[in-house]
Image (tube, grey):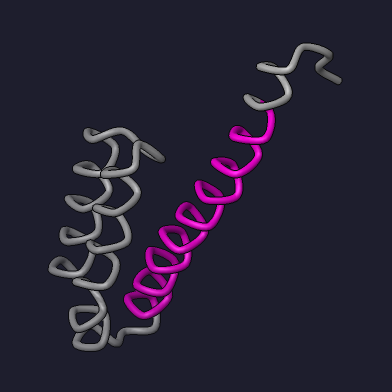
Amino acid sequence: MPIIKSAKKAMRGSRNKRVFNDRRKGALKGAVKEIQTLVQAGKKAEAQAILPKAFKAIDKAAKGNTIKKNTASRKKSRLSKLVSSK
């Protein structure tokens, strides 16, 4: 446990950021997983309709530095490739 006042304050901020980042990352993973299950089930049109929702979650995570910019770009590229290929 921190003893110094500034370290206690940093710990509080860190805890809040962790909750925020976990929520963002969970939304991202959920959206990606939803598209993957739809594609595996053969529901390509539904996956295409949900694609903007997944892109939004990915962009929000990248904007807040939850994930890196190139990671976001890679995820978006792979998702669009997955939806268009099958």
Measured as percent of width and height from the top left, residue 7 is found at 69, 17
Name which quarter of the figure residue 12 lies in: top right
Query: Quarter of the image containing the N terminus?
Result: top right
The answer to whether 45 is drawn above or below residue 2 in the figure is below
Residue farthest to the front? Answer: 5
Q: Is residue 78 magenta?
A: no
**Is residue 61 positioned above or below 10 on the image?**
below
Quadrant of image for the C terminus = bottom left
* Foreground of the two, 38 or 8: 8
User: Is residue 16 within the magenta segment?
Assistant: yes
Indicate left or right for 7 with 46 as reference. Answer: right
Rendered residue at 39%/68% (across/down): 31
49 vs 64, left or right, is left
| The magenta segment | 11-40
In this view, the residue in front, 60 or 32, is 60
In screen coordinates, is 63 left or right of 77? right
